Image: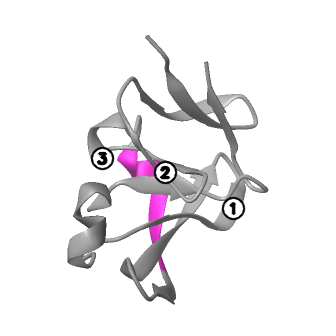
């Protein structure tokens, strides 16, 4: 069975054996987030014509804050209901692997 992991500086922040992949991004289910206190709400939002409005998290590891490292869809459009509240990470900011 494959496992998807998200790490920053060697700190595991998400791990899942079941996830959704959309447009090349791994969307981790909410239950796979290891420590929700590391995820700080951001004011950033973006819009996708078929998924809806994405909301962002800044991830804080120790003294390091990675602005808008993760995003999720709290109220996705019908075609994207499968990723509701799932968290995806920018690959340039977070090491995401599937093994």
Q: Which residue is mark 1?
A: 66
Give percent across and percent down for residue 45: 49, 86
The disc placed on residue 30 is: 3
Give the quarter of the image for residue 51.
bottom left
Give percent across and percent down for residue 78: 20, 74
Label 1 Cα crowd, 10 Å radius (few <14 / some 14-19 / many 20+): some
* Magenta extent: 36-42
Q: Which residue is mark 2?
A: 38
First reached walking from the N terminus: tag 2 or tag 1: 2
Q: Reply yes or no: does residue 40 show up in magenta.
A: yes
Q: Is residue 68 left or right of residue 49?
A: right
Label 3 or label 1, whichever lies nearer to me, is: 3
Residue 80 drawn above or below residue 92: below
Tell me which residue sits at (39%, 23%) in the image.
17
The disc placed on residue 11 is: none
Q: What SS does tag 3 mark?
A: helix
First reached walking from the N terminus: tag 2 or tag 3: 3
First reached walking from the N terminus: tag 3 or tag 1: 3
């Amino acid at each position: 069975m494959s496992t998807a992991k998200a790490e920053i500086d060697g700190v595991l922040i998400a791990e899942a054996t079941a996830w959704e992949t959309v447009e090349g991004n791994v969307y981790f289910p909410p239950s796979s987030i290891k420590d929700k206190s590391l995820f700080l709400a951001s004011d950033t939002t973006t819009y996708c014509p078929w998924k809806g409005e994405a909301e962002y998290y800044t991830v804080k590891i120790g003294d390091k804050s990675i602005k808008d490292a993760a995003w999720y869809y709290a109220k996705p459009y019908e075609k994207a209901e499968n990723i509701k509240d799932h968290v995806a990470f920018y690959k340039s900011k977070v090491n995401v692997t599937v093994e």
